[in-house]
Image (cartoon, rainbow, N blue to C red):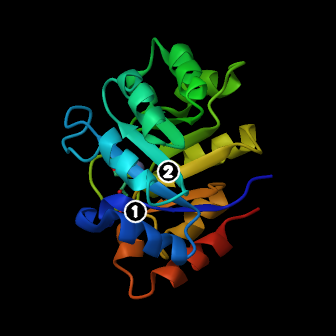
């Protein structure tokens, strides 16, 4: 079976206090820390890269769930591996030719490979990567257009989650974008078990309550 992983998106944190924000989320019961790496090219926003992951790693042993919204993910494998990243989720839209080499490299740096798909990308595109002899270990279904926090959840993406859950009963399926108390039930009942949430957690009066509520909704 699958286990719930609640992953606060540190994109919604105070980047000037990243270590204490991370600790605060772990104290509230977060399972993973979701790190949004954007290159200003694949998406119209620029965030952090390997140097910041390396700095944060010195302050926590937590699983750093890195989401690569970049055009050339292969260039990031070695630096992120060295920096201490845990998960490396690349976008299928930019990995049409070299995904086998990419997965291999990610694993050789002791990171856990995942593949993400944008709202407009058909779910079938990730099947070969999951069915491969050297497979990804997680599929991230984007529930907003990647680039920014605080956008509205797209419920029509739940069809992708349902299809994936039916086909792969024990696969980690992550959802990212617009998740919070009002959308978690849709995502969880569709079969998602890894839940990324930025604004709904960081904006809450009681982030710990939001985290435990979301964990309780995930079906094990
Ligand atoms: C968006 C990022 C998300 C984002 C989620 O491109 O991938 O991780 O931070 O933020 P919320 O939960 O506010 O939609
Ligand atoms: Zn993300």
Vertical placement of residue 34 versus 29, above or below: above
| Label whose residue precedes the other's in the sequence (1 or 2) | 2
Left or right: 152 in relation to 158: left
Is label 1 or label 2 in front? 2
Percent across and percent down for residue 49 are: 31, 41
Q: Is residue 151 visible?
A: no
Q: Nearer the viewer, residue 211 or 76?
A: 76
Residue 118 sits in which quadrant? Answer: top left
Q: Residues at badges 1 and 2 in contact (C-beta under 8 Å)?
A: no
Q: Nearer the viewer, residue 67 or 166?
A: 67
Residue 66 sits in which quadrant? Answer: top left
Please report the residue visible at 43 percent of the width from the left and 26 percent of the height from the top.
78
Percent across and percent down for residue 174 are: 56, 50
Q: Is residue 94 visible?
A: yes
Q: Is mark 2 within 8 Å of ligand 2?
A: no
Please report the residue visible at 41 percent of the width from the left and 60 percent of the height from the top.
9
Residue density around tag 2, few if under 14, some if 14–19, many if 20 or more, within 10 Å = many
Left or right: 84 in relation to 193: left
Percent across and percent down for residue 104 are: 58, 19
Callout 2 secondary element: strand
Vertical placement of residue 174 versus 153, above or below: above
Q: Is mark 1 within 8 Å of ligand 1?
A: yes
Percent across and percent down for residue 207 are: 46, 80
Q: Quadrant of the C terminus?
A: bottom right
Vertical placement of residue 128 versus 52, above or below: above
Q: Residue furthest front?
A: 58
Please report the residue visible at 65 percent of the width from the left and 42 percent of the height from the top.
163
Residue 178's label in the rendered image is 1
Q: Residue furthest right?
A: 1
Residue density around tag 1, few if under 14, some if 14–19, many if 20 or more, within 10 Å = many
Callout 1 secondary element: loop
Circle 2 sits on which residue?
64
């Amino acid at each position: 079976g699958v286990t719930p992983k609640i992953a606060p998106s540190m994109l919604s944190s105070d980047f000037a206090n990243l270590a204490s924000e991370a600790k605060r989320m772990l104290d509230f019961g977060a399972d993973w820390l979701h790190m949004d790496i954007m290159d200003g090219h694949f998406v119209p926003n620029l965030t952090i890269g390997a140097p910041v992951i390396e700095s944060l790693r010195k302050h926590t042993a937590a699983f750093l769930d890195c989401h690569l919204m970049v055009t050339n993910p292969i260039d990031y494998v070695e630096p992120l591996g060295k920096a201490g990243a845990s998960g490396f989720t690349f976008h299928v839209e930019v990995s049409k030719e070299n995904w086998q080499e990419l997965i291999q490299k990610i694993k050789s740096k002791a990171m856990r490979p995942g593949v993400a798909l944008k709202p407009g990308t058909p779910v079938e595109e990730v099947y070969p990567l999951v069915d491969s002899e050297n497979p990804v270990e997680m599929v991230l279904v984007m529930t907003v257009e990647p680039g920014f926090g605080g956008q509205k959840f797209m419920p029509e993406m739940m069809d992708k989650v349902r299809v994936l859950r039916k086909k792969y009963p024990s696969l980690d399926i992550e959802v990212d974008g617009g998740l919070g108390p009002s959308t978690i039930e849709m995502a969880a009942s569709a079969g998602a078990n890894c839940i990324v949430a930025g604004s709904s957690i960081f904006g809450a009066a009681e982030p710990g309550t939001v985290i435990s509520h979301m964990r309780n909704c995930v079906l094990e």
